[in-house]
Image (spheres, grey):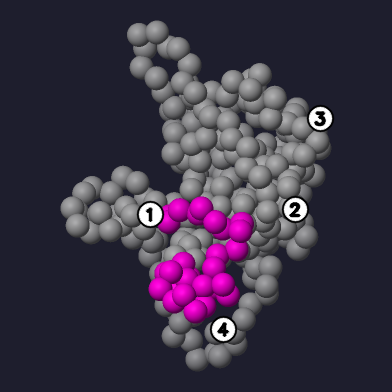
Amino acid sequence: MYPSSSRILRSLIHKTSYIRMSSSSTSSKFCLPQRLQGSAESVWNEYITLAMKYQPLNLGQGFPDFHAPENVTKALARVAQSENPLLQQYTRGFGHMRLVKALSTLYSKLVGREIDPVSEVLVTSGAYEALYASILGHVDEGDEVIIIEPFFDCYEPMVKMAGGIPKFIPLKPKDTGSAPVTSNDWILDDKEFEGLFNSKTKMIIVNSPHNPVGKVFTQAELERIAELCKKWNVLCISDEVYEWLVYDNKKHIRICTLPGMWDRTITIGSA
């Protein structure tokens, strides 16, 4: 689950809608813009209300039941208690240099190439902001964005906020006979998938490891996505916030490492 920036935005939208309905004298001024018409309230707002009422075991949100590492909490405490006022000021807008250098060192090893910490690493307030900035910064009015279903709930409204047109394709479980269906048995119909790409396609959002199915896209599946991205000159947003949660001897493959994909991929990670 991502940090709450988008949910805050939707809360404000919901309140604005309430003002519009409750005050007829201002309705023409404060009605929701056309691009937001029909936006539903976040499913998490609905869930939290029900969770508070019925107290179920929460398997739907990323709420770990363990503490942060002690060395991290102690370091934060030292900074918070420091008498140096410079530690409480604005930092570099693209990310503190020590942090972006550390990320550069880590991911350079993972992708097999040198990453420039200044020009190729950006730190945001959670993956929500990274997604929204990437979509808003690249999608123009009328651009089509391919979204694989099921998807995390922010993808669709973010695309619409940018004036884009979401184009959906579902993951479907393949026939496994009498064997149980696993997360990796959910696949894309290749003909249907290829048919979504055209001259209006600006972007595809790929989420692997996948939320909520848990699917880890295979090398062959990612190569097919890359093939169509290159054919139609499409940007790939690779949402990899669950890159560290891969089990059963599966391997997380970063689509940016495939031939021809480095310059057309924005990779988004999180804690």
Relative height, residue 66 to residue 19 (above, below):
above
Q: In this figure, which residue is indicated by the disc labeled 3?
A: 231
**Mark 2 lies on residue:** 140
Q: Quadrant of residue 229?
A: top right
Within 10 Å of the Cα at label 1, are there few (<14), some (14-19), or many (20+) other Cα atoms? some
Comes first in the chain, label 1 or label 2: 1
* Dot 4 or dot 1, earlier in sequence: 1
Q: Which residue is labeled 4 in the image?
A: 87
Give the residue at mark 1: 44
Q: Nearer the viewer, mark 4 or mark 1?
A: 1
Would you say the residues marked 2 and 3 are in contact, meaning their CB atoms lie under 8 Å apart? Answer: no
As measured in the structure, the alpha-carbon distance from the residue carrying label 1 to the one carrying label 2 is 28 Å
Q: Residue at x 44, y 76 (%)?
A: 23
Judge by depth and name the residue closer to the eye, 53 or 21: 21
Secondary structure type for disc 3:
helix
Q: Vertical placement of 180 versus 21: above or below?
A: above
Q: Nearer the viewer, residue 122 or 35?
A: 35
Q: Nearer the viewer, mark 4 or mark 3?
A: 3
Query: What is the crowding at mark 4: few (fewer than 14 residues within 10 Å), some, or many (at least 20)?
Result: few
Disc 1 marks a residue whose amino acid type is Trp
Mark 2 is on which residue type?
Asp
Chain-order first, disc 2 or disc 3: 2
